[in-house]
Amino acid sequence: MERRKFFRNFAVGGSLLLTAPVIFNSCSDDLTEDDNNNNNNTGGITVDLTDPDYAALKTVGGFAYKGDIIIIRSTETVYIALSKVCTHLQCTVTYSSSSKDIPCPCHGSKFNTEGAVLNGPAASPLKKYDVKQNGNTLTIS
Ligand code: FES
């Protein structure tokens, strides 16, 4: 290998080695940001029940969304929080207050308000979160 060619290859390889950590850190930051947006791996997200965005939760049967979570008020004191991510192929599900179930628009799976599968092709329940109420604050974890 010619000396000039060797140094050119060395310079290109060195540049890649120097930029690799930046690229990997960038990916790592994306995952962290995504986790925070999904609120799946944090210590818990909070919902302020006095916030107008969550006014529907003042009524039994009401529901609201926060990030990728469906929150349903099932009784005076019980709130259910489920993932909006279908367990079949990860389409986004939405709560149907008229039929009181959670259909998936992609392939017809249906879940009940506990997250259990009513109709396939999904074979696994929706992820269910723990919900604790303290006054006007729900903590979902
Ligand atoms: S992604 Fe929901 S049924 Fe296929």
Image (spheres, rainbow, N blue to C red):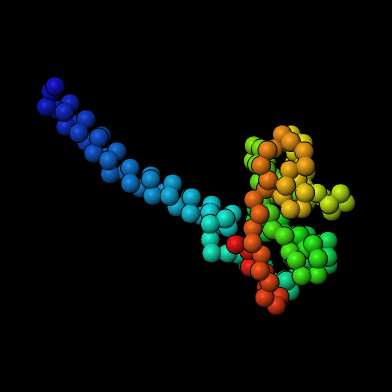
List the single residue furthest toward the top: 1
Whether 13 is drawn above or below 112: the answer is above
Quadrant of the drawing holding the C terminus: bottom right
Residue 136 position by quadrant:
bottom right
Image location (x, y in percent) of residue 106: 73, 36
List the single residue furthest toward the bottom: 135
Whether 10 is drawn above or below 102: the answer is above
Drawn side of residue 17 relative to residue 134, left or right: left
Drawn side of residue 56 relative to residue 33, left or right: right
Q: Is residue 31 visible?
A: yes
Residue 91 position by quadrant:
top right
Query: Which of these two is toward me, 75 or 2?
Result: 75
Quadrant of the drawing holding the N terminus: top left
Which residue is rendered at x = 38% and y = 49% of the image? Answer: 25
Q: Is residue 105 visible?
A: no
Image label count: 0
Which residue is rendered at x = 83% and y = 52% of the image? Answer: 100
Image location (x, y in percent) of residue 123: 68, 38
Image location (x, y in percent) of residue 137: 67, 73
Image location (x, y in percent) of residue 109: 75, 38
Which residue is rendered at x = 73% and y = 64% of the image? Answer: 79
Which residue is rendered at x = 70% and y = 77% of the image? Answer: 135
List the single residue furthest toward the left: 3
Drawn side of residue 25 relative to residue 30, left or right: left
